[in-house]
Every structure is written in C-alpha cells, then in structure tokens.
Image (tube, helix red, strand yellow):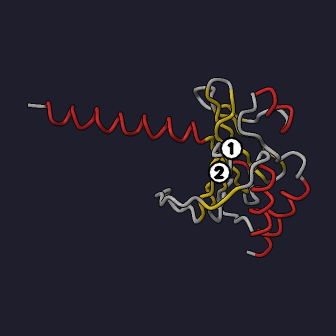
Amino acid sequence: MKYILFIGFATLTLSVNNVEAKIGETKAQTDARYGNDTDISFNGQSVTYRIKMLRIFCDFNEEKCVRIEYRIATPGSLASLTYDARFNDESKALLLILNQGGSKFLPFEKKLEYFDFTDVMKTEDGKTMALISEKVIVFESIDYVEERQKNTEAAAIRDAVKTISKP
C-alpha cells in the first residue's frame, strides 16, 4: 500500500508542471497543458489525459473546462487498469494549490452529500469547488455545479409530475 501511495506522489511531483489545471480553459489550452487527449467521451464533452499513472478527466461546457477529476491508476495492463491508489496528504495539498487559480481554498460550511468525499472546499472568490476523497480529487466550476443541481431538480420534478399524471 505504501508503494502505491509513493507512486502516486512521485507521479504527481514529477508532473507538477503538467497538472496545474485551470477551470475555464479551452480544450486547446488543456491539450497544450497535458498533451493530446487520450480518450474522448461519446458526446465530445469529456476527455481523458494520461501523465504517467495519473489520469486527468476534464469535462467541457460551452467550450470551457468546468470539471477536472484526478485519479491515480494502479499498475497493470490498460485492459485491467483500476483506480484503487490513494492520494496522500502531500498530493492533496499540492493539487489544491495548483488548482486554486489565485484564490485560496477554504472549507465549505454547507453540509453536502457528495458520495464518499471527505472534504468539500470552495475558493474565496466563490468560483471553484474542490471535492476530495482518498481516491478521487475533483475541481468544479460553481456555476457548473449550480446548473447541474437545477437540471437534477427539474428532472426530479418532471418525474414526479409524470408519476402523478399516470392513470
């Protein structure tokens, strides 16, 4: 287990110039930062970049990066690649610094239920949210989070109306 943590921190440390992602960047800017994407989702809105064992998943909305997710792949063939490696405290702190965009991350006071994320943080300027767990670190545009919540609430209301209106 310590070996996997070391690999993750070493990968992150050796790649420090490449992992400084920015919410709001265009696809061309993320390509320039990470190299060419290695996987494009079915809708063309999500891409995956690989830097050694680090995987960086970027989601785009209106041609701007709105979500960045970091995972460390465990060693093995690509066919059996898993993401069981854990980020150590140093890696988490480094990613927070690299992704703060000039505005410090602070603990988010509001209680949110985000799967198994142990920490939820928000930048002082209120533009970016960080969701942190042992295996996944996510940075999201607050505007994107709010839009997604509205869409989820609207879908729930539509589903409720459909259920009520059924004979």
Residue 27, by quadrant, is top right
Q: Provide residue 158's location: percent of width, then percent of height.
A: 28, 32
The residue most toward the bottom is 2
Q: Provide residue 36's location: percent of width, then percent of height.
A: 82, 32
Residue 140 against residue 165 in the figure, above or below: below
Residue 6 against residue 147 in the figure, above or below: below
Q: Residue at x 70, y 56 (%)?
A: 105
Q: Residue at x 63, y 26 (%)?
A: 44
Inter-mark Cα distance, 1 to 2: 6 Å
Tag 1: residue type?
A: Ile
Q: Residue at x 76, y 40 (%)?
A: 22
Q: Quick one: quadrant of the C terminus? A: top left
Element at badge 2?
Answer: strand
Tag 2: residue type?
A: Val
The residue most toward the top is 62
Q: Are marks 1 and 2 in contact (CB under 8 Å)?
A: yes
The residue indicated by pointer 1 is 68
The residue indicated by pointer 2 is 138
Q: Provide residue 103's location: percent of width, then percent of height.
A: 75, 49
Is 53 in front, or is 158?
Answer: 158
